[in-house]
Amino acid sequence: MAANIDHIILVIAPEPEPHDNLIDRYLVASETADIPAVILLNKTDLIGEHNREQIQTLLSRYENLGYQVVQTSAAGAQDTPAPEVQDLVKGQTSVFVGQSGVGKSSIIQTLLPDQSLRVGAVSESTGKGVHTTTTARLFHLPIGGDLIDSPGIREFGLWHMTPQELEYGFREIRPLIGHCKFRNCRHMGDPGCALDAAAEAGEVSPERLKSFHRILQDMTEQQARGLKLS
């Protein structure tokens, strides 16, 4: 995680289809690093009747948790940065993260019209982004502030974290820490699990709980493999 930054801007788009588990991994990383996160929906021109409800449901889930959500489109605006994007980055040190193909380079191009950036496309066969950034890059913005563009990635591992840090990384789960019946509760259907009770009460969404379980399982498996290799 980059040091001395003001916020992480997580860029998503209707295409490639946003994956909530990847979004949650970025948010967990930002929460545990105590760095504010903003969700920036790019390519709003690709929203139509076929995906409008799905996108709105996804955005509402994070807005309800208190995350700032901003919508924009860099299409056809190569030399004119969108006001909502300027407001986000002006005078700030920002880190752009997100999977390949969401248009991070296109957004940066509008902020740095004199820079020649390689802009990628989305593969028609897979719907996945084509990588345009392989190493993190630092840009000094003419409007003031710095921008760090991180490589587009398909997965974001959190294997180095403890289960307790993962719990802290989910805003709605954080208040439940220590409230399970048993101290060694694995939150996987254990008796007296506070997470299960909160989910039944509608305080934790099924999607976020599923995402938590998946990340926890991935962490456990990766840590086990690491122990075997050491």
Image (spheres, rainbow, N blue to C red):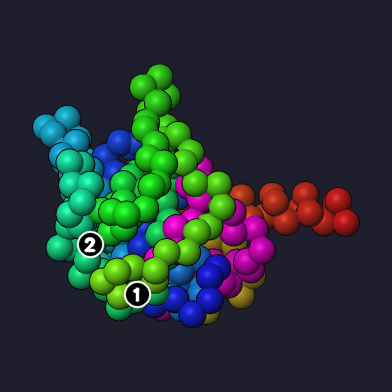
Q: Residues within 10 Å of mark 1 (few under 14, many from 20)?
A: some
> Which residue has dot 1 on it?
145
Residue reaching furthest to the front:
114
According to the picture, the residue beneath numbered tag 2 turns out to be 85
Q: Residues within 10 Å of mark 2 (few under 14, many from 20)?
A: some
Disc 1 is placed on an element classified as strand
Nearest to N terminus: mark 1 or mark 2:
2
Q: Is residue 127 left or right of residue 137?
A: left
Question: What is the CA distance from the residue labelled 1 to the residue labelled 2?
Answer: 13 Å
Amino acid type, label 1: Gly
Q: Which residues are magenta?
A: 147-176
Is 162 part of what is drawn in magenta? yes
What residue type is disc 2 on? Val
For the question of whether residue 200 can be seen, the reply is no
- The answer to whether residue 36 is left or right of residue 218 is left
Between 90 and 206, the one nearer to me in the picture: 90
Secondary element at tag 2? helix
